Image (cartoon, rainbow, N blue to C red):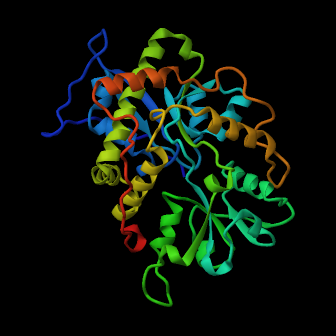
Amino acid sequence: MAASALVLTGCGTADSPKTATPGASGALTPIKLQLQWFYQAQFAGYIAAVDQGFYQEQGLDVQLLEGGTDIVPQTALAQGKADYAIAWVPKALASREQGAGITDVGQIFGRSGTYQVAWKDSGITSAAQLKGKKVGNWGFGNEFELFAGMTKAGLDPGKDVTLTQQQFDMQALLKREIDAAQAMSYNEYAQLLEAKNPKTGKLYTADDFSIIDWKKEGSAMLQDAVWANTEKLSDPAYQQQTVKFLTATIKGWAFCRDNAEKCRDLVVAKGSKLGKSHQLWQMNEVNKLIWPATGGIGVVDEAAWKQTVDISMTTKNQTGDTVLKKTPEGLAYTNDYINQAITAAKSAGVDVNGTSFAPATVTLQEGGA
């Protein structure tokens, strides 16, 4: 299904006055940001930065382009259809290797949110215990953390497990058609806890499932990042624009850290098909992937980058392919612009580290309502 490009405009409210800082011409600079997927709290910081006028404060008129199954954000960026894009690092690096001129300028998610989930009664609690099991995964480049985890545990993903193409939901696991399912902490895992146990008539709980967290298994990879056009980064005007864009983006994510329910409402208002309790869960879990940010939100951690690249080059999927054939060349990432944005945000009184961030306890409703 083709995803439409929707325009979000920053309209002021009584409690959030907007002070635009136009460019030299007096007009706001139009910017297109390509999102990675449909509207959901995964992108709440950008939605909030539009709604709260943070982009306008920087002299930018940002249009958010909704993603979808047939949209590759980094390709849209490379082809000039967007000024910036949100994409997982491994997938974007694969596009770079194929010629896309893009650079990671803001590593917003500092941690991976990918799980492999099984029924508690299966006894599966680690990658090694997937041997001989039916293992679901989405494919499309989403599988490499799983494959790296199995490889690290001494399993051959092509021989030691039965791989099953999984839909972007948890029905195959709920019906026990597979033994373990791929899930994002902020999305599909919540779908399990929103489902009713037919034996009890009540919702399932975390006690019904076991989680393999790739962060703990040592095979996590970097995910949502802001990517810029590499060639344009040689232009001082685009450099300055990038700093302004990142400064406002930092404000947006800090706002959602401190106002999770407000950002939930903003996402729901944009027409998300996911309900209010699901979106609040997602907002809370996404915040966990960002905060605390020891080096500052968006700064690329070299160790995490190296692990992502190493896995991308060495881990093979069931057909023997790796994400990357060689080490990324050229300007694959830079912290120059995010560091400038962090300085600007700090001077405006924004907490860019979120050291005191404490996740909330979210109660899910049936179907995520």
Residue 14 against residue 288 in the figure, above or below? above
Point out the image quarter for the C terminus: bottom left
- Residue 297: percent from left, percent from top: 45, 35
Taking the image as shown, residue 158 lies to the left or right of residue 266, namely right
Residue 210 against residue 266 in the figure, above or below? below
- Residue 14: percent from left, percent from top: 12, 39
Residue 27 against residue 369 in the figure, above or below? above
Q: Depth check: 96 or 281 in front?
A: 281
- Residue 87: percent from left, percent from top: 56, 39
Taking the image as shown, residue 241 lies to the left or right of residue 173, namely left
Could you tell me which residue is drawn at 47 percent across and 25 percent down? 338
Could you tell me which residue is drawn at 38 percent across and 22 percent down? 343
Residue 73 against residue 20 in the figure, above or below? below
Q: Residue furthest left?
A: 14
Could you tell me which residue is drawn at 75 percent across and 54 percent down? 147
Could you tell me which residue is drawn at 42 percent across and 71 percent down? 367
Res 8 seen here: no
Taking the image as shown, residue 79 lies to the left or right of residue 29, namely right
Q: Residue furthest bottom?
A: 199
**Quarter where residue 243 is shown:** top left
Res 152 seen here: yes
Q: Depth check: 18 or 295 in front?
A: 295
